[in-house]
Amino acid sequence: MRTNFDLGDYETACFAAMKAVEVAVRDASGLDNSLVGVPLMRRAFQPHQNGKPGGPLADSGAEGGGQEAESALFAGAMGRYKNPSSHRTVGFDDPIEAAQIIQFADLLLRQVDRAKARNS
């Protein structure tokens, strides 16, 4: 079977890649299904502050700015590349851009794997 990307359906391919990130974050964090998209990312990667624990995937060994950047990176990815396709038709017509979005999702999945390893 040919993939959505191979068929030129870049919107669906990008959506599926970012959905995989969302599912991986939810599974790794143990957060409830009621959290989706940007709120899920913000909660999962919420920075540790003033001695208070952060989100389940936040890197307690990283400095505050690094933790905030990771939270923003994941939230931004959802807000920019997954949420629009969840709610309306998005015109993806550039295969190079679509491939880059899919590669970005792969990088995020690697970071989720690192966070899981840190927590186990």
Image (cartoon, rainbow, N blue to C red):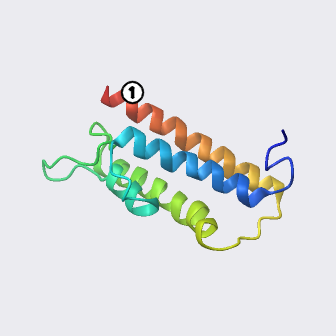
Q: Is residue 40 left or right of residue 85?
A: left
Q: Count the marks: how many?
A: 1
Q: Which residue corresponds to the image point at 77% horizontal and 57% vertical from the top-left? A: 10
Which one is in front, 92 or 48?
Answer: 92
Amino acid type, mark 1: Ala
The quadrant of the image that shows the C terminus is: top left
Q: Is residue 45 visible?
A: no
Residue 64 in view (yes/no): yes
- Report the residue at 32% width, 44% height from top: 58
Is 9 situated above or below 48? below
Locate residue 83 relative to residue 34 in the image: left or right: right
Question: Where is residue 98 shown, x and y percent of the image?
Answer: 75, 55
Task: Indicate whether 99 appears above or below 109.
Answer: below
Residue 106 point in image, percent of width and height: 61, 41
Q: Quadrant of the N terminus?
A: top right
Residue that mark 1 sits on: 117
In the rendered image of this protein, does residue 27 appear above or below residue 92? Answer: above
Q: Is residue 52 left or right of residue 25?
A: left
- Residue drawn 30% across the image and 45% down it: 63
Residue 35's x, y, as percent? 37, 58
Classify residue 15 by image quadrant: bottom right
Mark 1 neighbour density, 10 Å: few (under 14) some (14–19) many (20 or more): few
Q: What residue do we see at 33% from left, 48% from top?
A: 31
Q: Nearer the viewer, residue 31 or 93?
A: 31
Up the image or down, 54 lies above or below 118; here it is below
Residue 22 as seen in the image, left or right of residue 97 = left
Determine the image quadrant of residue 71: bottom left
- What SS does tag 1 mark? helix
Q: Position of residue 22 (x, y in %)?
A: 49, 50
